Image (cartoon, rainbow, N blue to C red):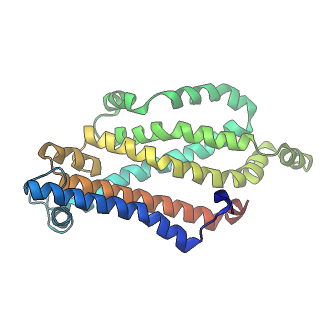
Amino acid sequence: MRLVNIRPGRATSLVLGILPVAALVFVYVLASASRHAINPGDRILPTPAAMVSAMHTLMFVPDPMTGRLTLWADTLASLQRLCLGLAISTLSALIVGLALGLVPLVRALFGPLVTIIALIPPIALLPILFIMFGLGETAKVMLIIIGILPVMIRDVAAHVETLPTEQMLKAQTLGASSWQLAIRVALPQMMPRLIHALRLALGPAWVFLISAEAIAADIGLGYRIFLVRRYLAMDIILPYVAWIALLAIALDWLLRLANRRLFPWAGSS
């Protein structure tokens, strides 16, 4: 049997997915133990016990200055910014992507502009955003939107543009207007692709969020990571990075579940 034809089952896939992570954790524990055997005060590779102790403090001990539980306050602040940016980007991508993909005049008018914006590095716009919107929440959310929206629009518009022409002709033959073509023909087929585009945008959205929080914020996951780096507090940085990864995985899983439940026909096709 050829290697490309071997398809592991659900249990086998789960075990195979866990193996690299377990191997990485095992290598880290060995390296940490080796460094601490030479230098018990080493801060570069903290022991698992040190990380658990630091995270326990951040999770369950209120900050003496603010009275907040640091990890949960940072997580809530970051998720609020992220979800707001994702929600605005998704709604905008739905409307603009549908118009660009379905209406040639709109595509000719705004297509080049969307392409130009998509090619601009969003981080380069961060100083401009801070100048225009200040150091508050608006600039952080806008960076997420500018970073992921043009790419989502291009992805969705390209998908709508490749819908079978026969469907459009049949609908028009039956008397469908442009609005009905958009709502009854293009929109249902576009929605699974929109969720897929949102899943692909999660990674870049986290990058833009952490970048904005690192520069101008007083709370958030990115703010905390860049705050403690000056003290070489790897016992906080590494768990925070792992926590961000877990949050990203959870959001991706929820989107995948929603796509499978709402549009089961898209997965089967």
Q: Is residue 128 left or right of residue 155?
A: left
Q: Residue visible at 22% across and 44% down?
A: 226
Please, is residue 230 above or below residue 66 in the view?
above
Residue that protrudes farthest toward the right in the picture: 173
Q: Position of residue 195 (x, y in %)?
A: 58, 54
Q: Is residue 143 left or right of residue 265?
A: left
Please, is residue 117 above or below residue 219 in the view?
above
Number of numbered discs on residues: 0
Give 30 or 87, whichever is nearer the viewer.
30
Q: Position of residue 27 (x, y in %)?
A: 29, 58
Quadrant occupied by the C terminus: bottom right
Q: Residue visible at 38% across and 28% down?
A: 124
Quadrant occupied by the N terminus: bottom right
**Quarter location, residue 239:** bottom left
Q: Is residue 225 visible?
A: yes
Please, is residue 219 above or below residue 132 in the view?
below
**Quarter location, residue 3:** bottom right
**Quarter location, residue 109:** top right
Give 179 or 117, whichever is nearer the viewer.
117
Residue that protrudes farthest toward the front in the picture: 1
Q: Residue visible at 57% across and 48% down?
A: 197
Q: Position of residue 177 (x, y in %)?
A: 82, 45
Q: Position of residue 74 (x, y in %)?
A: 26, 55
Residue that protrudes farthest toward the bottom in the picture: 11
Q: Is residue 216 visible?
A: no
